[in-house]
Image: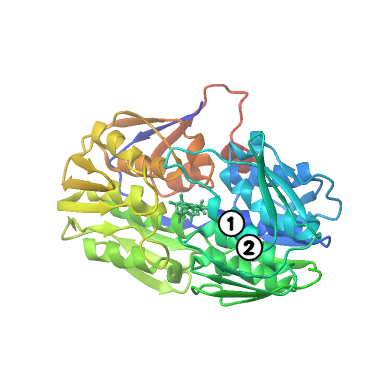
């Protein structure tokens, strides 16, 4: 297993460019299953989860060409299998996004039921209930979700999510796009990735209105066609690099981003003392912090509030802020795995239920630590950049799932970070990208 070796204490300075959003590229790739015509997606980040999603499409019978590294041309004209097996789903939960499109276009789908993961039990009951409301028969067979549309086609319906679910909303949007009649999704997720998927679906000929609001209306159509679409910038990668500048007392220009997608993060970080300036619609300048950082409380909530995917990185930053900060996690029940690793590096953090109190400021010291999930790994990288001495982060395959070229990007702005390979034969996604560009 690969590790990162980071020597902290250097302020980051320079320009860093943001990649396409993993969480948008995943549903957009799944949406290519809705049509026999070719879909071209640009700005697809070269990260492990997208390689897995591509493999899933190919296993189902789709052809995926990459004329350029971040462009995927998908033709799903020859789908013969309607199944996402356990081997894929266990490595990436977002494989469940195949359910909606397969069910909508072919009237059948079989997808292994994802188990829990490091951050919580993460059921998909709300996806399944919604498919039933659209007329599907759903059962569990040998650990797989088996869904069928009795007459071959789903029927539009009112879907009222009792809890906001991002991939649940995306799955239903895709399923409803080819259903007979109108579907209204109430209490829909409002994340920018939902809007991006709706843009793609509408370019394919779907009739989706209201994406980005709590109520989404989808008028089902008979067929969808080919389209081209560019994936939005990754707002969580953007937020992570803002924190990287702040935690190292550096000065970064972050380009190719979409500041409007992370208003709550920018607002909260400004409250703590981070200086963030919007140079233009896609560029941020981040400086930190003549007066030092102040501890501020935060609560994670569905968009447009502060995202759970920035909670771990924010916690790392708060170890460097004066005073106490209380971090409430309301989305996932077990998303503080990074806290005990940060404590090993010298942080003072107390956990009580879904609330963590960070007592700052503490000097962080390099230590061997373990990544437990994608965003937890990002928080350890950030802490290591601020720490005195060397940190070795184990299990960085978690970070490879969602951060494109993080070692190269951070090195280019002065970070002392190296990937250590256990085996020279084992090439990582990041090395392959480095070779390909
Ligand atoms: C998506 C994101 C993930 C982010 C999360 C919350 C992708 C690929 N992943 O995950 O990065 O952290 O949104 O912003 O876009 N729930 C149920 N039943 C369901 C579905 C969800 O109880 O059927 C619960 C979950 O356990 C969780 C909450 O609802 O407590 C929100 O989860 P959800 O929005 O569905 O997360 P994902 O779509 O899996």
The location of residue 245, given as percent across then percent down, is: 33, 54
Q: Residue 129 carries which label?
A: 1
Please report contact status of discs 2 and 1: CB closer than 8 Å, yes or no.
yes
Pick whichever, 204 or 361, lies toward us: 204
Please say if 26 is above or below 173. above
Tell me, yes or no, if residue 128 can be seen here. yes
Residue 248 appearing in the image: no
- In the picture, measured across the screen, residue 299 lies left or right of residue 216, that is left
Per the rendering, the mark at residue 243 is: none
Above or below — where is 216 with respect to 354? below
Q: Where is residue 236 in the image (x, y as percent from the top left)?
A: 44, 56
Residue at 58 percent of width and 59 percent of height: 24
Looking at this view, name the residue that lies furthest to the left: 323
Query: Quick one: 372 or 378, which is closer to the camera?
Result: 372
Label 2 residue SS: helix
Residue density around tag 1, few if under 14, some if 14–19, many if 20 or more, within 10 Å? some
Q: Which residue is drawn at 58% across and 56% down?
A: 129
Vertical arrangement, residue 335 with respect to residue 293, above or below: above
The residue that disc 2 covers is 133
> Seen in the image, is 116 located left or right of residue 113?
left
Question: Is label 1 in a helix, a strand or a loop?
Answer: helix
Mark 2 nearby-residue class (10 Å; few <14, some 14–19, many ≥20): some
Where residue 168 sits in the image (x, y, percent)?
56, 58
Which residue is drawn at the image coordinates 67% and 50% (left, top)?
138
Queried on whether the Cβ of the residue with tag 1 lies below 8 angstroms from ligand 1, the answer reads yes
Location of residue 94 in the rendering, given as x and y in whole percent from the top left corner: 59, 48
Kindly tell me whether mark 2's CB lies below 8 Å from ligand 1: no
């Amino acid at each position: 297993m690969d590790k990162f070796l980071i020597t902290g204490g250097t302020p980051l300075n320079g320009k860093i460019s943001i990649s396409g959003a993993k969480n948008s590229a995943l549903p957009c790739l799944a949406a290519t299953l809705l049509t026999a015509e070719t879909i071209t997606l640009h700005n697809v980040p070269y990260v492990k989860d997208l390689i897995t999603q591509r493999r899933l499409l190919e296993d189902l019978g789709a052809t995926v060409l990459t004329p350029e590294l971040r462009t995927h041309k998908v033709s799903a004209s020859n789908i013969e299998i309607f199944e996402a097996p356990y081997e894929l789903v266990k490595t990436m939960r977002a494989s469940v996004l195949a359910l909606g499109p397969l069910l909508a276009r072919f009237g059948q789908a079989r997808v292994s039921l994802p188990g829990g993961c490091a951050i919580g039990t993460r059921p998909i009951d709300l996806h399944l209930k919604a498919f039933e409301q659209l007329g599907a028969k759903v059962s569990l067979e040998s650990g797989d979700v088996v869904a069928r549309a009795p007459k071959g086609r789903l029927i539009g319906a009112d879907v009222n999510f009792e809890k906001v679910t991002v991939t649940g909303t995306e799955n239903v949007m895709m399923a409803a796009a080819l259903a007979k009649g109108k579907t209204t999704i109430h209490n829909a997720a409002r994340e920018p990735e939902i809007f991006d998927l709706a843009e793609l679906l509408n370019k394919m000929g779907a009739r989706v209105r209201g994406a980005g609001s709590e109520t989404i209306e989808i008028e089902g159509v008979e067929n969808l066609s080919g389209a081209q679409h560019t994936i939005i910038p990754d707002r969580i990668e953007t937020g992570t690099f803002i924190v990287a500048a702040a935690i190292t007392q550096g000065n970064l220009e972050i380009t190719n981003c979409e500041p409007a997608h992370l208003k709550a993060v920018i607002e909260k970080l400004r409250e703590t003392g981070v200086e963030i300036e919007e140079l233009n619609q896609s560029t941020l300048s981040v400086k930190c912090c003549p007066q030092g950082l102040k501890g501020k409380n935060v609560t994670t909530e569905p968009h447009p509030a502060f995202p759970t995917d920035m909670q771990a990185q924010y916690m790392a930053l708060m170890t460097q802020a004066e005073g106490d900060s209380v971090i409430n996690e309301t989305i996932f029940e077990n998303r503080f795995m990074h806290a005990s690793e940060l404590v090993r590096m010298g942080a003072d953090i107390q956990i009580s239920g879904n609330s963590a109190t960070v007592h700052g400021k503490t000097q962080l010291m390099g230590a061997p630590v373990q990544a437990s999930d994608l965003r937890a790994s990002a928080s350890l990288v950030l802490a290591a950049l601020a720490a005195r001495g060397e940190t070795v982060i184990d299990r960085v395959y978690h970070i490879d799932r969602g951060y494109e070229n993080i070692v190269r990007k951070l090195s280019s702005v002065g970070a002392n970070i190296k990937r250590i390979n256990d085996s020279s034969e084992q090439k990582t996604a990041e090395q392959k990208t480095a070779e390909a560009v």
